[in-house]
Amino acid sequence: MASTSGPAHRSVANIRPQPTVNQSTPGSPHTPLRTISSAYGSPSALRAEEDCVVIELGTRCLRAGFAGEAVPKAAIGFGPEEQRRPGDYRRWHTDYEKDWRQRIQGDEWGKGNELWQLDLRGVDLGLVGDKIERAVREAFTKYLLIDSRPRRMVLALPSMLPLPLLSTVLDSLFTNFQPPNISLMSSPALTTVAAGLRSALIVDIGWTETIITGVYEFREVLSKRSIRAAKLHGEEMFKMLVDAISPGLRKNDTENEAVEKMRQVISFEECEDIIARMAWCKGLKTDGAKPVARGLTPVVEEDELRSSIRSLNLTGGTETDSVVAIPLRTTTPPRTLHIPFSKLAEPCETAFLASGRPFQEFDDEELPLHLLVYQSLLYLPVDIRSMCMARMVFVGGGSKILGLKERILDEVAALVDNFGWSPVRGKAVDQLRFNPKMQNRQQQAGYDPMGIKTSLRTQSKDSAEEAVPTALLEQEADPIDAQLQQQASKGTKPLESGYLRAVDSLGAWSGASLLSQLKVPAVSVIDRDQWLTYGASGASKELDISANITTKRQSLGGAAAFKSGAAERSSWTLGLWA
């Protein structure tokens, strides 16, 4: 019943009739409580804080998606078509494809399709930041279907990215999207995680350079690079196509004039389409039968080509040099180019492998890929080398060329058979290795190449035991240790090591998505407020961070140290990029 205190005209009970069906309900007006399911509750605020966006940045492409997914939802390039303004509908004009010569950007081949260049002397960092902002905003609105609420971000970046480019990337993301923090992760380590490994040799055949990184227990222990990458291969393919279309175009002209004329013959997009469809690499020519490799399935090159290009218009048999017909749309006039199929493999030989050139002509930054892989393995310690050589991961756009992985592995195996794992080169070493007279002279002199007297081997057993130092004697086998090792190894798989093997990986983005879903903390976690206040200069040095962590462990203990680091990040670092 309603309360009777107060005037009658102010009583709500006199206005509304008394309930007759259910006498237990109160008479005063009230709003019934509604139980909203958590599955259909208000998702905007809480989900924005829990979501983590994973972004991978490359020279020509940006990949974005949510943590926990296997593949990215968005893959956005940085070409001229992706930089059009809203309302620009020239792409659907009837003569748009014919006017491609008027839209050539940059002085170099393919420069208009790059986000940045590692040579920062001519790079506009403000333009790089604007391109990143537009690509991320397009990924959010068109592919991820989310708004611009603050969300945590994880960046997968190359470990050799220059600090000015990293500062530009972080400034663009913190200013335009306001994430609370950004975690930086190294692409080689993430590629190793995505392959299901702890140690690997990552061969990243990218656009501007090839980077080989040795990873041991998720730590980068070696990094080497070469300019022989997909861009150089594209330039060689472009020159080969121009020579086939117009044989005498480059004669009697200077280098700049010849380059300007070549760029008017065929477009960059069509050349890339030909590379993606028809570029391939020849196999290594050997005298005898090649042993079966455990890493890659041995397939005869001719059988592989037959199965992959049946849909092409081919004339001639596979025993001879087949002729392929390539329709060209951007030439004037459009035509069909008939070219031997073996010519499409010559750019790969020139760009990646530098066939026909001696080793002495190469600079340290332009080594062929097989020599770069061999030297990277040679500079690693013996135990790490045995692990990495059996876990070689090829990633990047250039690794998709048919037959390139197998050719690199065969070349490296041939180098190991010829030179072993010794860095010593020269005529004297070759004479010592292949000349039997030199070996006989050393045996007569009493020394072998390892510096141990060979005359001791011909002596009696008692005198040899007295003359050979104890450090050079073989250790006696202990049956108890052998039995214990045998029992400990029961139920465990043997460790794969000591031979060349290739392993596939899902890529750096998938590795970052997996680690973010598992809540694995990154080495470098940058808060927005600290970055906007101090910038890159506010990052602590490695020595300061190690000393700070040691102090916390000694004073607070392990659990308190982690809680303190999670509660407030008074010191942060840029990790590998500092």
Image (spheres, rainbow, N blue to C red):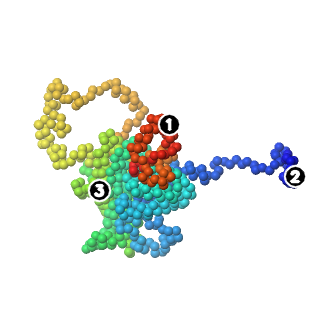
Which residue is disc 1 drawn over? 559
Q: Residue at x 44, y 64 (%)?
A: 127
Spatial CA span between label 2 and label 3 = 97 Å
Spatial CA span between label 1 and label 2 = 65 Å
Using the image, determine if residue 487 lies above or below residue 29. above
Using the image, determine if residue 515 lies above or below residue 174. above
Circle 1 — which element?
Answer: helix
First of labels 1, 2 by sequence position: 2
Image quadrant assignment for residue 245:
bottom left
Circle 3 — which element?
Answer: loop
Instruction: Identify which amino acid the numbered label 3 is placed on.
Output: Glu
Instruction: Identify which amino acid the numbered label 1 is placed on.
Output: Ala
Q: Nearer the viewer, residue 292 or 5?
A: 5
Which residue is disc 2 drawn over? 7
| Position of residue 249 measured from the top left corner of the image (x, y, whole percent) | 30, 72
Using the image, determine if residue 175 lies above or below residue 514. below
Image quadrant assignment for residue 366:
bottom left
| Position of residue 333 measured from the top left corner of the image (x, y, whole percent) | 38, 75
Q: Nearer the viewer, residue 574 or 468?
A: 574
Image quadrant assignment for residue 459:
top left
First of labels 2, 3 by sequence position: 2
Decide: few, some or many residues near mark 2? Use Cα within 10 Å; few <14, some 14-19, many ≥20. Answer: few
Circle 2 — which element?
Answer: loop
Spatial CA span between label 1 and label 3 = 49 Å
Q: Nearer the viewer, mark 2 or mark 3?
A: 2
First of labels 1, 3 by sequence position: 3
Which residue is disc 3 drawn over? 366
| Position of residue 118 measured from the top left corner of the image (x, y, whole percent) | 36, 58
